[in-house]
Image (spheres, rainbow, N blue to C red):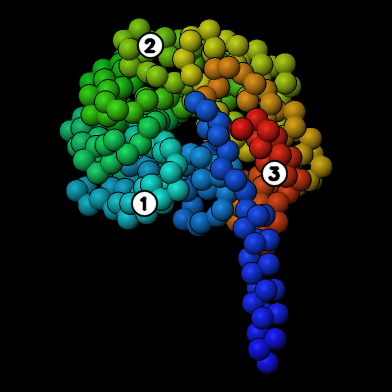
Amino acid sequence: MQMGRIVVIVALTASLVAVASAAPARNNYGNRFVGTTWSGFNSPLFGTVFTQITPENAGKWGSVEPRKGKCYWGALNAMYRFAQRKHLLVKQHNMIWGEQQPPWVNVHNAAAAVRAWYAAYAKHYNGKFQFIDVVNEPLHHRPKYQKGLPGGNTKWGWVIWAYQLARKDFPHAKLLINDYNILGYPKETEKYIRLIKLLQARHLIDGIGCQAHGLEHIKSSVIRADLHKLGSLGLGIYISEYDLNFKSDRKQLQQMKTQFPIFWNDPLVRGVTFWDFKQGHTWLPYTYLIRRNGTPRPAFVWLENYLRVAGR
């Protein structure tokens, strides 16, 4: 009986050692990061492969304050506690986005409402996040209450005001802008650059966010050319919402091996944030890198190996 117990203990110890040795080690990316979104689940990949986190819906004004004066911080509080425990960088997403704003905000109360929203966020989290998407998708989705903001009667005056307020309320964070159809769409890239220059001239912006949905069939040469144009501004570039929507493991792997090194080898790219990674939590159906049962798709196996070398 005693011998049986010893065998069981030895076997259990060996299995625990095997599990521990299989867990990914924390990568050191220097002044860069690889991140993902917060969907409320834990994973050994947080704090190891992924060193940065951003809220998806939980950080948006429409989610936090759907009714005037009634703020729901629970999901964000959980994310910030998780980030602190895992030693993750935090990027807040986002402060103003025309597609998802509280329904009670209008042209008559907009300026006061935005000031109160910024102040409330600063009170709860100032100093706990390193980056912030101040205005999301300004080229494509302007808020319905734009004319109620200072500068709202001009094309970009409201954006400039939003960043002036952010610089005052979030003095410790890097202020970013974020939009889509930038990489792979040269005309959109040029529009983006003109807006960024307005903010840059006023010292209101610290980095350029480039959403990276829909790059499955964009030529590498076009991506490189647009990154080069953005890089001419001298600001850090953040690949903010990266995913590859392939049902085929082979095609996803092929494109990951082609595209990710373009970002990672660009000296001005400071971070790449995957728009979630687990099946059932991603925005699009086939962008996941980890299956529901916990097994990785080939693209993630390649990515983890690539980062293990690059992140040492």
Residue 158 falls left or right of residue 245: left
Query: Is any atom of residue 286 visible in this view?
Result: yes
* 302 relative position to 186: left or right: right
For residue 93, which quarter of the picture?
A: top left
Label 2 to label 3: alpha-carbon separation: 36 Å
Which mark sits nearer the N-terminus, 2 or 3?
A: 2
- Type of amino acid under label 3: Phe
Residue name at image x 60 percent, y 11 percent: 228
| Residue that carries the numbered disc 3 in the rendered image | 300
| Quadrant assignment for the N terminus | bottom right
Circle 1 — which element? helix
The residue that mark 2 highlights is 200
Instruction: Judge by depth and name the residue closer to the eye, 122 or 186.
Output: 122
62 over 307 or under it: above or below: below
Q: Nearer the viewer, residue 82 or 288?
A: 82
Mark with earlier residue (2, 1): 1
Give neighbour class at mark 2: few <14, some 14-19, many 20+ (Cα, 10 Å): some
